[in-house]
Amino acid sequence: MIVYIVMLLISIIFLKLAEKQEKKKLKILMLILAVVPFFLVSILRYDLGTDYLKRYVHDFNEMAQGRNVENLEIGFKLLIQFCLIFTNNPNILFIITSAIILGFIMYTIFTKSKNYILSILIFFLCGFFFNSLNLVRQYIAISLILFGYKFLLKEKKYYFAFIICTLIATTMHSTSIVAIILVFLNKKEIMNYKWLIPISLVILLVNENLFELIKPIIQNTRFNVYLTGNMAKGEVSILYILENFLVYIFMYYIYTKNKKIDQNGKEETLLLNIQGLSLLTTVCGACHMQFMRIALYFFIFQIISIPLFIYKIPINEVKQDIEKLFKKLKISSKKINLEKIMPKIKEITSAIFIICLLCVFWHTNIKNNDNEVVPYKTILNKEISIGEK
């Protein structure tokens, strides 16, 4: 884990330097250097995650021998064929896929985030970076959808560009077709808590029984593997459900406050709806574990939605709500000194999010090693593990 922590710290240093740069070229250089540590750790890895050798190296070697690989999307096959033009060494596959994944995700952060450092911390602490080391095909698809997100914020004629990005994504991982729904989510608030929370509770109560309704649809397709064995089980991830629920409630509260003063735009509406989908699909994981993979297409947007909604906190409106709450609880606002606290409310909120995400990170990637990425192993010396479990 030491390698990953050092990687993160170096990246943050360059991001801080980027913030201080007045010249555009120097700022761009600092931002590029901030990505380099993530890129180096990604391309130099060896046998991290369950799919590294069993899936990606194996499939690469099979195609290098001229054999076809079943159950592999055409886009990823073409990507392997492109790699084989240059070398039969599978390391090139991880170099190119890392460049694609980190390139599109970091581009989205640097062009859409209101707080680069917070976005990078969310990318790291929520496990998205660690997922990308394992779920390579899906994260190429996710990065393409993130890249296409900007087109949904423009005029309707640009939506086609997002659809193109999504269709290309499906050639990498077919489940990404679900992202098409985002085209319909930027006009009005659809994910309202009045129906979202009750339905989520019902799904949790019904759990795996709900999937019985979907069985007839996929039992004669290549996805019938998800109908038997461990693949057919639900996965109730209380930690991720709680995280998505709290983020949704925070975003909904800020959205409602800004709605009263007419400060919401297309982006706020879209990101609130995406977060609602993230919560709903995470809850649906109780019905079938595949929903947890689908949730990633929406969950990833927190790298830009959380910084945006913190940036959009309406200080005066929030202050009034806090004062009303204190009055009900018979707490003196003078003791809390709201006049000094409120100007720093955005920084305080960011700090609270980071602390909460640290708890998530501790449980998932340190305590349980969910993505099997520690100890870090490198292609430079495959026999030595760098870092600590």
Image (cartoon, rainbow, N blue to C red):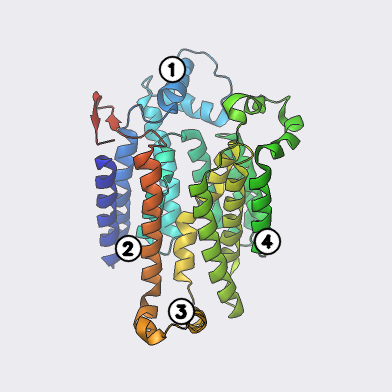
Q: Is residue 85 visible?
A: no
Q: What whole-number distance in Å separates the C-alpha atoms at marks 1 and 4? A: 46 Å
Q: Give the residue number, with chain letter if any, for mark 2.
A: 24
C-alpha span from label 2 to label 4: 39 Å
Q: Which mark is residue 315?
A: 3
Q: Amino acid at mark 3?
A: Ile
> Of the residues tagged 1 and 2, which is closer to the observer?
1
Lower sequence index among marks 1 and 2: 2
Q: Residues within 10 Å of mark 1 (few under 14, many from 20)?
A: some
Front position in the image: 382 or 162: 382
Residue assigned mark 4: 190
First in residue order: circle 1 vs circle 3:
1
SS at circle 4: loop
- In the figure, 107 relative to 2: above or below? below
Residue designated by label 1: 61
Does dot 1 land on a helix, a strand or a loop? helix
Element carrying mark 3: helix
Residue 203 horizontal/vertical position (percent): 67, 47
Confirm whether residue 197 shows in the render.
yes
Amino acid type assigned to the residue bearing label 2 in the image: Lys
Observer-side mark, 2 or 4, equals 4
Question: In terms of image quadrants, where is residue 373?
Answer: top left
Q: Residue furthest front?
A: 330
Estimate the spatial distance between the alpha carbons at disc 1 and disc 2, rounded to whole Å. 43 Å
Q: Are marks 2 and 4 in contact (CB under 8 Å)?
A: no
Quarter of the picture holding the N terminus: top left
For label 4, the crowd category at 10 Å Cα-Cα, with few meaning under 14, some 14 to 19 and many 20 or more, is: some
Q: Quadrant of residue 70?
A: top right
